[in-house]
Image: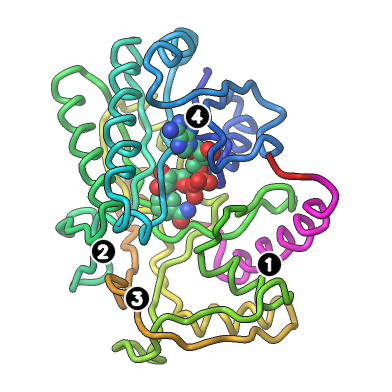
């Protein structure tokens, strides 16, 4: 079975491509390489294309059985400053992909949604029925695309799974795939850069939240566990043919200071830190209730914070050495 991974050259898509291939599926990568990397997916069939290009999509969707949609603008802070670009890519252009998929007669679609659709819920942990109140244009576009999927599912027989990732983190155990973005905004790579001296310090935005140590708490889920969830979601669409929405997280939250101290343990290095004021819109705590995914998707994460940090640390060491020799696409 051939699966088109739109945005498959990025961080999460490239891990999913490997897992699909290990499970006997044929991943085909469709990407504009705005933030993706050729060396992540060089063993697979690759199409350089835009999600806004209906004709190109229709051409390549001829030989495909399912679509996974990872492509997006995904910087929450930037989305507040540039909502126009975020709505254009994550809604208008993404709808072109959805239209091309439906027009090509493909009925299986898996979407990278986000816990950002929930905003800052008061009730924790967050279940799939927790009301969605996204705080940023990024989260709003994710919620709106989920709504479009529901409407298309009702009208055109499309079957979809929307996967609401919590904080994706870690790297492939091989050390050959991992997080590589510019600018880097995710906590774990930033902590490890500070540990290795590639940055002077990691910034902590607020240490006066109503949490045990005053810093924000998040649910970090290993990228290869997310990859397995995509295979489970595809299996679900193939065997049950029902649309559904799942939260993907571990159910355990870690504060920024806990992540830093675990990173110090893994790297055996001190992490310099800088306390800064809170960022507007940062919820104090986000923790996933993964019960529904466990029951219906038969998925639960296999890796914890130490595996996340040790694989991310290995990736950083190898990638820094590779990056010194060859330019990244
Ligand atoms: N990383 C996380 O913690 C996280 C959490 C929740 C949701 N998500 C969502 O998961 C998805 C993947 O995230 P990621 O961290 O792998 O991001 P990423 O930036 O590494 O990957 C996105 C990929 O999409 C490609 N792309 C972007 N715009 C495109 C376009 N117009 N046409 C074709 N390709 C395009 C990029 O080149 C890149 O390869 C995104 O939709 C993101 O919103 C990520």
Query: What residue does disc 1 label?
Result: 310
Secondary structure mostly seen in magenta is: helix
Q: Residues within 10 Å of mark 4 (few under 14, many from 20)?
A: many
Q: Which of marks 3 and 1 precedes in the sequence?
A: 3
Q: Residues within 10 Å of mark 2 (few under 14, many from 20)?
A: many
Q: Nearer the viewer, residue 306 or 116?
A: 116
Q: Which of marks 4 and 1 precedes in the sequence?
A: 4
Residue at coordinates 48% horizontally, 80% vertically from top-left? Answer: 256
Along the horizontal axis of the image, is 202 left or right of 70?
A: right
Along the horizontal axis of the image, is 20 left or right of 144?
A: right
Residue at coordinates 21% horizontally, 57% vertically from top-left? Answer: 134
Q: Nearer the viewer, residue 294 or 113?
A: 113
First to last magenta residue range: 302-326
Between label 4 and label 2, give the one nearer the viewer: 4
User: Between marks 3 and 2, how big is the CA–CA gap?
Assistant: 22 Å
Query: Residue 200, position in %: x, y?
Result: 65, 80
Query: What residue does disc 3 label?
Result: 279
Query: What residue does disc 4 label?
Result: 5
SS at badge 4: strand
User: Between marks 4 and 3, how big is the CA–CA gap?
Assistant: 33 Å
- Residue 31 part of the magenta-drawn span: no
Residue at coordinates 19% horizontally, 71% vertically from top-left? Answer: 123
Residue 300 visible = no
Query: Residue 302, position in %: x, y?
Result: 54, 58
Between label 4 and label 3, give the one nearer the viewer: 3
SS at badge 3: loop
The image shows residue 14, relative to residue 4, as above or below, that is below
């Amino acid at each position: 079975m051939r699966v088109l991974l739109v945005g498959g050259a990025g961080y999460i898509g490239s891990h999913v491509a490997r897992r699909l291939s290990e499970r006997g599926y044929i991943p085909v990568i469709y990407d504009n390489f705005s933030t993706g990397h050729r060396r992540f997916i060089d063993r697979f069939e690759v199409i350089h294309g835009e999600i806004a290009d209906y004709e190109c999509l229709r051409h390549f969707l001829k030989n495909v059985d399912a679509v996974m949609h990872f492509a997006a603008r995904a910087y929450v802070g930037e989305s507040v400053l540039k909502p126009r670009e975020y709505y254009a890519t994550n809604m208008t252009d993404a709808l072109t992909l959805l239209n091309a998929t439906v027009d090509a007669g493909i009925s299986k679609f898996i979407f990278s949604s986000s816990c950002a659709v929930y905003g800052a819920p008061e009730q924790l942990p967050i279940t799939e029925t927790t009301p969605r109140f996204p705080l940023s244009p990024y989260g709003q576009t994710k919620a709106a695309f989920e709504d479009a999927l529901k409407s298309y599912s009702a009208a055109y027989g499309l079957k979809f799974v929307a996967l609401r990732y919590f904080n994706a983190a870690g790297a492939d155990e091989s050390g050959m795939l991992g997080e590589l973005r510019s600018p880097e905004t995710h906590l774990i790579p930033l902590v490890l850069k500070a540990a290795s001296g590639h940055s002077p310090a990691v910034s902590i935005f607020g240490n006066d939240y109503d949490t045990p140590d005053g810093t924000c708490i998040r649910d970090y889920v290993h990228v290869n566990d997310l990859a397995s969830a995509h295979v489970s979601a595809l299996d679900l669409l193939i065997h049950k043919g029902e649309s559904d929405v799942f939260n993907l997280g571990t159910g355990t939250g870690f504060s920024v200071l806990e992540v830093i101290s675990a990173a110090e343990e893994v790297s055996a290095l001190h992490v310099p830190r800088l306390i800064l004021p809170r960022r507007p819109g940062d919820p104090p705590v986000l923790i996933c209730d993964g019960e529904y995914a466990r029951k219906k998707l038969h998925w639960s994460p296999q890796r914890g914070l130490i595996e996340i940090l040790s694989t991310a640390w290995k990736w950083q060491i190898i990638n820094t050495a590779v990056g010194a020799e060859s330019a990244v696409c």
